[in-house]
Amino acid sequence: DGGITQSPKYLFRKEGQNVTLSCEQNLNHDAMYWYRQDPGQGLRLIYYSQIVNDFQKGDIAEGYSVSREKKESFPLTVTSAQKNPTAFYLCASSRGQVGFEAFFGQGTRLTVV
Amino acid sequence: GQQLNQSPQSMFIQEGEDVSMNCTSSSIFNTWLWYKQEPGEGPVLLIALYKAGELTSNGRLTAQFGITRKDSFLNISASIPSDVGIYFCAGQLRDSNYQLIWGAGTKLIIKP
């Protein structure tokens, strides 16, 4: 079955550590996205990528980094520069220019301890 | 940045009642999408709208793309307990790249 897989589901990080969240899709989608969701809030865009080897900052990119070396994969690194990293992180993909419907993974809940 | 105004923020309803929520903006959109999110999960696409005036149903759900292209509504008829969750609207601006603009969500709660 086609879909988007995020891992891990839960992640605990010590202050000062970098962590990487995985996102893989087998939908053959061109575009991929990372969102952050805080309790009771909507979705805020961190980074997005329209094609391989290219990505753009979203509204809240500070303290985060991404790579897009393969069409299927769009990992997100939460760096120690992110001052308030505890949140629910959602990865999504879409066909891009020919289709804007975004399909989401199940999310990763990151907690700083 | 661009914003969508989604209302109401939350709704307490009795099982069997009809539900209505909407999203409005001062900007013009090419596409409207409605999603449902359950606790601890990613949003799931419910309905996609592509043309002004378009009315689309998915079971007990009906959504419309406003004729001005600046708004959209979602109706749920005869609500049931599994309708509980947060409903989000998202729009793709007329003059934009691949980004979606998101509403803040409507939380649906069924009264016991």
Image (tube, grey):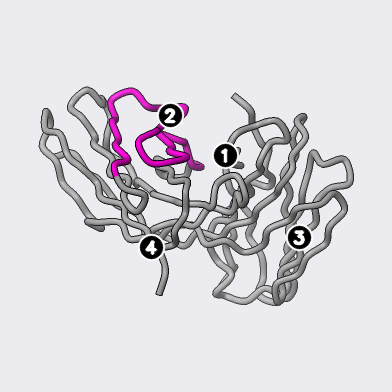
Q: Is residue B93 magenta?
A: no
> Do the residues indicated by labels 1 and 3 lie within the same chain of the protein?
yes
Number of the front mark, 1 or 3: 1
Dot 1 corresponds to which residue? B98
**In the rendered view, does A19 fall on the left or right side of B59?**
left
Q: Check disc 4 and give the amino acid type.
A: Asn
Residue positioned 47% across, 54% down in the render: A29
The CA span between labels 1 and 3 is 22 Å
Q: Chain of mark 2?
A: A
Q: Magenta segment, which residues?
A: A42-69
Dot 3 corresponds to which residue? B63
Depicted A40 relative to depicted B17: above or below = above
Q: Check disc 2 and give the amino acid type.
A: Gln
Residue B112 vs residue B103, the one in the foreground: B103
**In the rendered view, does B99 fall on the left or right side of A65?**
right
Q: Chain of mark 1?
A: B
The CA span between labels 4 and 1 is 19 Å
